[in-house]
Amino acid sequence: MMVIMKPGHTREQFEDVMNRIKEEGLEGHPIVGVERTVIGVVGLDRLHPELADDLEVMPGVDTTVQISSPYKLSSREFKRDDTVVAVGPARIGEGTVTVIAGPCAVESEEQLMATARAVKQHGASLLRGGAFKPRTSPYGFRGLEEDGLKLLQQASRETGLPVVTEVMSENTVDLVARYADVLQIGTRNAQNFFLLEEAARTGKPVLLKRGMSSSVQDWLLAAEYILNKGNRDVILCERGIRTFETATRNTMDINAIPLVKELSHLPIIADPSHGTGKMKLVEPVCLGMVAAGADGLILEVHPTPEKALCDGAQSLTFDAFASVMASTAKVAHAIGKRMEREAAVTA
């Protein structure tokens, strides 16, 4: 349910409504807009039928509206305007294409610093890199852990690029949050609800990848766990889903981009690296995702992909990344957008 306040309501009237909601054991989530203030009320399975009527007669309240979708706070019904997530100077979801780029895994200082400098030179706005790596096999390279986080922080200080890195467990959330600007929740943890809530409590923006077998509704309900803890800075990431097809690593769901734009106010980016698993497919899929309306891309880049300890087959060389950025800028311009770091891309 949404409680819509009257224009010119007082602070005291607003607090009275919030207290009335709390008395029912429910949670109120206010959105203060230019034209109106809306309070989202969640926990409606405990709602008594008269509460909407009770709220509507309170001073300062205009009306109440039921939200029909199962995901309340992430829906367009709750918030009509697009959410823009600020990360350092970047603003994800503000009509631009924001690119997050870097290696799949942090392997060494030399590898990371070279990659960070290259992706910044060619127009990336944020640096990605895995310090903790979820691997299908326990024998694969699983990351440098805190040493990797320290290297990411070092690269961020030199280049000025904010850091995006994955958090895999509840007991490492605080550690990762000390070094990272954005906490990434990977596909394997997309419905680890305790981890989602713990990441939300840090107050850091959360990049939520779609689960490998998640429906769009599953995905938006996962985002709801973060939003319901008071963290409004959620970035969705389409990274392909698991289907019967074996020719590519995953099946990239281009439908999800415009569909999520219709259903939700949250920004959505795309991950063609994991979506395809093949370096040669990354560029054309980038173009399709941007044309479909993606707010950004997250790409894997490595100085020598053939020597990468993780996901080398889908990693772009520095020259290939430059090509992707140039062609993506052309598509962005064609649909009335620009690259978030326009000057660097067109230099």
Image: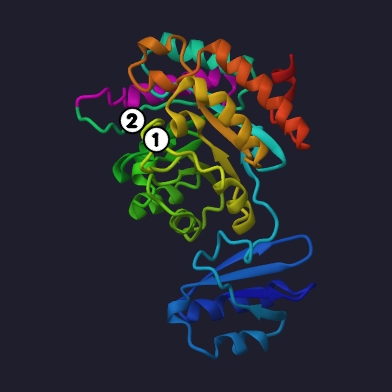
Q: Which residue is identified by label 1? A: 176
| Closer to the eye: label 1 or 2 | 2
Residue 337 is left or right of residue 89, and the answer is right
Residue 46: assigned label: none
Q: Residue furthest left?
A: 139
Contact, mark 1 vs mark 2 (Cβ under 8 Å): yes
Earlier-in-chain disc, 1 versus 2: 2
Q: Quadrant of the N terminus?
A: bottom right
Q: Main secondary structure of the magenta part?
A: helix
The x and y percentages for residue 147 are: 34, 21
What colour scheme does the image use?
A: rainbow
Instruction: Tell me where the magenta segment starts and ends, as one range.
Output: 139-161
Picture residue at 69% right of the left edge, 30% below the top: 340
Classify 91 as above or below 23: above
- Distance from disc 1 to disc 2, alpha carbons, whole Å, reads 9 Å
Q: Nearer the viewer, residue 326 or 128?
A: 326
Q: Which residue is identified by label 2? A: 132
The x and y percentages for residue 205 are: 52, 43
Residue 309 is left or right of residue 84, and the answer is left
The x and y percentages for residue 288 are: 62, 34
Classify 300 as above or below 290: above
The x and y percentages for residue 189 are: 35, 45
